[in-house]
Image: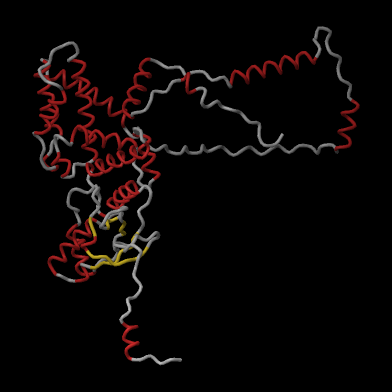
Amino acid sequence: MVELTPQDMAAKLLTTGFERSSPSVTKLSDPIADTPMVVTLDQLRPYDHDPRVTRNPVYSEIKASIRERGLDAPPAITRRPGEAHYIIRNGGNTRLAILRELWRETKDERFFRISCLFRPWPARGEIVALTGHLAENELRGGLTFIERALGIEKAREFYEQESGQALSQSELARRLAADGYPVPQSHISRMNDAVRYLLPAIPALLYGGLGRHQVDRLAVLRKACERTWERRALGRIVAAEFATVFQDVLTQFDTQPDDFSLQRAQDELVGQMAELLDADYDTLALEINDSESRQRALVREPAAPTPPTAPVLPAPPLPPVSAPQPGPALSVWRDATKVAPPAPAGTPPAPLEVREDQHGQRDERLQGHIVTPAPTTERLQSIQRMVADQLGDKLPDFAVDALRAIPVQAGGLYP
């Protein structure tokens, strides 16, 4: 082998190396499976559709715990496709705000770098993230009624974007339950009323924590007053609309929940209506109370049925002691020796009676399986219409629904 001279060695060392022709990667793709990772506060952002608007009522207690112990349960994080920053996946915006506050106060590195579990962004990412935040907030700190209402309205928006059509309240309740956040349909109806009619007038009262029962009473009062207004203003010229009157009256009571009086708000509203409709105050109040009672009866949640108690039956009497029965052979011999009595002369033949009985039983069974509408009255029909309007459902039609489910009687699995 020829030995290299110093000049040859220097020439080889100065030779240009391989050049990179592939494009440079500026950012690695996100993991496709759940992956633990360490991120900094600069890389994290709070979830922008977080339903919590007000301060967590246990914020100070959580901050004191994190200051002493650190994060016992670091939040799960995710990232939308194409985004530069990570976001909290399901609950944890309060803990993220506390970490930022503690980092500014202490400059302790354990508050700046946190261990998280990265979870990939799913196909239904926005809906999964929103329902996850709703459920997590309910478990950890609780949400006010209006915060839950706004969160569910946002979920309705995501569901309608996903399906491309408007959703009824019952369908929205079904989808929320399927995604792990069950909400009764009656609560969704009240939340819709609170967002549409109450939030523009009393935002401070609602965000201050006005409870569901008081929101229910306000919604029922508004509906009863609106019906009374429409009935009395029919064919007349009134100086204002009911929606304007209701908003103006309710705005005067936008205080803290402890200072709110529903009776005072009702008295003021009835007084304004009596003045604008030129009606007697007491008569108008009686009409509104009657309509309010009927409305409350419609939206009241049914009580859980109590199981029926089993009746106490007396002990059966002991059978009397009878003489010993003859053996089977003797009984068969006696039955065989009996002679059947002759049939009377006017008796028709037996096969005809059997045939008529069979036809009668067959007709009776057919009549029992014919679908007919249940008897009803005008009052019952009006109540059914009110319930359908309240729930946002379609009024049942017997001519259409009877063909969808026809009862079938089966005789059993074995002949």
**In the figure, is residue 112 to the left or right of 340?**
left
**Closer-to-camera residue (39/177):** 39
Question: Is 73 positioned to the left or the right of 403 in the image?
Answer: left
Residue drawn at (32%, 23%), measured in percent from left and top? 386
Screen quadrant of the C terminus? top right
163 and 357: which is toward the camera: 163
Q: Nearer the viewer, residue 19 or 387?
A: 19
Total count of labels: 0
**Image position, residue 348 (x, y; %):** 80, 10
Q: Is residue 327 left or right of residue 89?
A: right
x then y, percent, for residue 79 = 30, 55
Q: Position of residue 291 (x, y in %)?
A: 24, 23
Q: Residue furthest top?
A: 346
For the rendered model, the colour scheme is secondary structure
Residue at 29% across / 67% down in the picture?
38
Q: Residue at x 32, y 91 (%)?
A: 6
The spot of residue 12 in percent (x, y) is 34, 83
| As drawn, 407 above or below 181 | above
Picture quadrant where residue 343 is located: top right
